[in-house]
Image: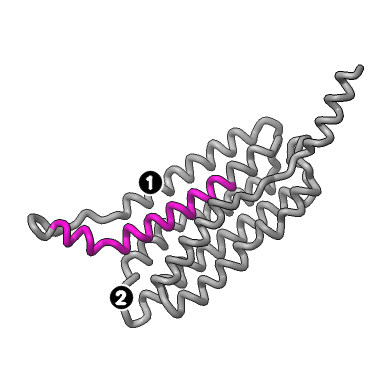
Amino acid sequence: MENETGRIEAFSDGVFAVIITILVLELKVPEETGSDFWHGVREQWPHYAAYVVSFLIIGVMWVNHHTIFSHLRRVDRPLLFLNLLVLMVVSVVPYTTNVLAEHLMEEGGSANAAAVLYSAVTVAYALAFLAFWWYVTRVGHLFHEQVDKEGARATRVRFGLGAIAYPLTVLLAFYSAPLTLVAHFLIAIYYAANQIPIPLVVEEERLETASDLRK
């Protein structure tokens, strides 16, 4: 499937775009009017907070997804299904975001249950993305020639940190739903600021170029 990576990435980008659009559509229009309008806007702060956090999470997902595909020269059938698995899990985020926003400040356990659901989906995403990356790096047959396959394989541990961090948010959800949302925000900020580079065979390319020039 040479030259198919662009088609798969375009399809995935479309799914991400739809997911983010659905996410913003979940923001409610205040029912209050007149002098109570701004009060109604303030009362919906859980929806705004959940929207910002989920937007960051999906944005980081998209950046990582784009980074990986920019280093692939071909795809195969197992990768297509793993990519669909990643997209399937991501598409649930708007639903869990809305559930968490609706119950964030409620008492009686519903807020904790909503936070557990929200965190559980992020755990599922982390595992799906980790499976995707492990398959890509297992042999390295899908990479461009310039990619350092051994170096890329060494990044598996850092890619897998989400599979440790997100389960911890599930445990935190049993204690506090607002703190769980804050934890997800901090994890998203961390991943946004610390993208994992995929190593390239830069040194070998430089030496080959120098040798060609001498000839």
Frontmost residue, 164 versus 84? 164
- Residue range of the region highlighted in magenta in the rendering: 37-64
Q: Specify the amino acid type for callout 1.
A: Thr
Q: Is residue 49 magenta?
A: yes
Would you say the residues marked 2 and 1 are in contact, meaning their CB atoms lie under 8 Å apart? no
Q: Residue furthest bottom?
A: 108
Residue labelled with disc 2: 106
Residue 66: image x %, image y %?
58, 42
Q: Specify the amino acid type for callout 2.
A: Glu
From the viewer's perspective, is 147 left or right of 101? Answer: right
Which residue is pictured at 45% across the width and 70% down the height? 180
Residue 100: image x %, image y %?
38, 66
Query: Which quarter of the figure has residue 114?
Result: bottom left
Q: Nearer the viewer, mark 2 or mark 1?
A: 2
From the viewer's perspective, is 6 left or right of 38? Answer: right
Which residue is pictured at 8% across the width and 58% down the height? 35
Residue 148: image x %, image y %?
78, 43
Q: Is residue 176 above or below residue 96?
A: below
Task: Determine crowd level at label 2: few under 14, some 14-19, many 20+ residues with C-alpha closer than 10 A.
Answer: few
Task: Determine crowd level at label 1: few under 14, some 14-19, many 20+ residues with C-alpha closer than 10 A.
Answer: few
Q: Residue furthest right?
A: 215
Residue labelled with disc 1: 21
Which residue is pictured at 58% across the width and 49% down the height? 84
